[in-house]
Image (tube, rainbow, N blue to C red):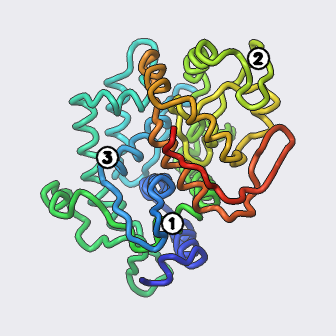
Amino acid sequence: MDQAHSDPLALGQKLVALLEGGRRTATYKLAVLMALLDLSVESVPDDPNTAVDIDLDDLTTRVIELYWRQMRPLDGHQLRQSTDGRGVIFATVAGLRAELTSAHRAPTIDLVVADRSDAYHAAHTTVKRTLVRYPLKLLQNVTTATAHERFLYDDSWMGTDSLRVVADHGNKLILFPGVCTTLARLAPLLKPAFQLAWVDDVRRMNKTLLADGPDIADHLFGTDRVSLLKAGDVLASEFGPHCFYCSARLTATRHVDHVLPWSRVGIDGLANLVLACPSCNSNKSDLLPSPTHVDRALGRGQHLLDELAAGINWPSQFDRVVSAAHGLYATQPESTPVWLGRKDIGVLGKVDFDWTSS
């Protein structure tokens, strides 16, 4: 195994070089990098030095999910994300959103994916072909290097939009041994850096529209708090109007909290949502929670959570929460700070319970 593949410092330097290696003409590479980070967190193997397959359909879905939220108009305007005419992915997702949006609002991306309509399938195919042809082929081009170095996966067969070629390669890319675990370890540092670069790129591509400097970070990467109200209602009805963390009775100011922080994994499924009082929610913020909180959230039971989610036409994503929790905690040092409760910070220690027991 190439030691550079599993060395966080070496791999991190190469990824930072991608950000600094020149002016990007589209946000595609950043979308792919962020999707790879999330999939790596959810795919951490028991052996940290093994190669890991990333299904290209899963990668495509994650890229579509990233752009889906960003298609919301900002002050009535659509933000540009490409300056060189290679806006196929952006245009495809925008077109899909426009086609599926009702007179009132667009459906959540989780429901669009689950529905598997003909329109979604066609858009998914277009995005996957474009990813293989362009950003996946060029992602590892670091301008400071004297020669092309493949440090994430083998891209020698890419650069084509042939679905036959994709199928011949198993419809997957294979992260080199050690890369998946290393990316998962680096995710808490790299994800904010990629988001900042994305925000800067969008600002540059929309100078006139964003001349007054509105905050677009939340527009690009924030969760839809309005949609979470529906999930909050069913949680209150089933489990009672109490804070999941401190058991305080909730008033009209109840919050819906992501147990695994949205900033780390971006899972909106009901399995990752709980009711919280404003104090606990603000104090927890983006901190990694104690694993016992995740265990309790999953302990509500997959069958019940799936049933509740189906009743409000909402995703459950129980398996994703399990995978993401495993990846997050397995790649953190035991000295990592974790949120135990309001104004109570501890250290991670050894995670010794079975994530799948719920």
* Residue with the mark numbered 1: 181
Q: Please determine whether, in this image, residue 318 is positioned above or below residue 25.
A: above
Calculate the distance from the C-alpha at mark 1 to the C-alpha at mark 2. 39 Å
* Residue with the mark numbered 3: 88
Q: Earlier in the sequence, mark 3 or mark 1?
A: 3
Compared across the picture, whether 321 is left or right of 253 comes to: left
Give the residue at x 60% y 12%: 237
Which secondary structure, mark 3? helix
Compared across the picture, whether 326 is left or right of 98 comes to: right
Calculate the distance from the C-alpha at mark 2 to the C-alpha at mark 3. 46 Å
Report whether residue 249 is seen: yes
* Residue with the mark numbered 2: 250
> The N terminus lies in which quarter of the figure?
bottom left
Q: Please determine whether, in this image, residue 40 is positioned above or below residue 262.
A: below
Q: Please determine whether, in this image, residue 262 is positioned above or below residue 118.
A: below
Residue 295 x, y percent position in the rendering = 61, 41
Which secondary structure, mark 2? loop
Q: Give the residue type at disc 3.
A: Val
Give the residue at x 70% y 45%: 289
* Marks 2, 3: nearer the viewer: 2
Residue 32 x, y percent position in the rendering = 43, 55
Q: Give the residue type at disc 1.
A: Thr
Q: Residues within 10 Å of mark 2 (few under 14, many from 20)?
A: some
Give the residue at x 82% y 49%: 345
Report whether residue 216 is seen: no
Compared across the picture, whether 347 is left or right of 307 comes to: right
Q: Please determine whether, in this image, residue 256 is positioned above or below residue 103.
A: below
Contact between marks 1 and 2 (CB within 8 A): the answer is: no
Residue 10 x, y percent position in the rendering = 56, 79
| Of the pair 153 and 236, the residue shown nearer to us | 236
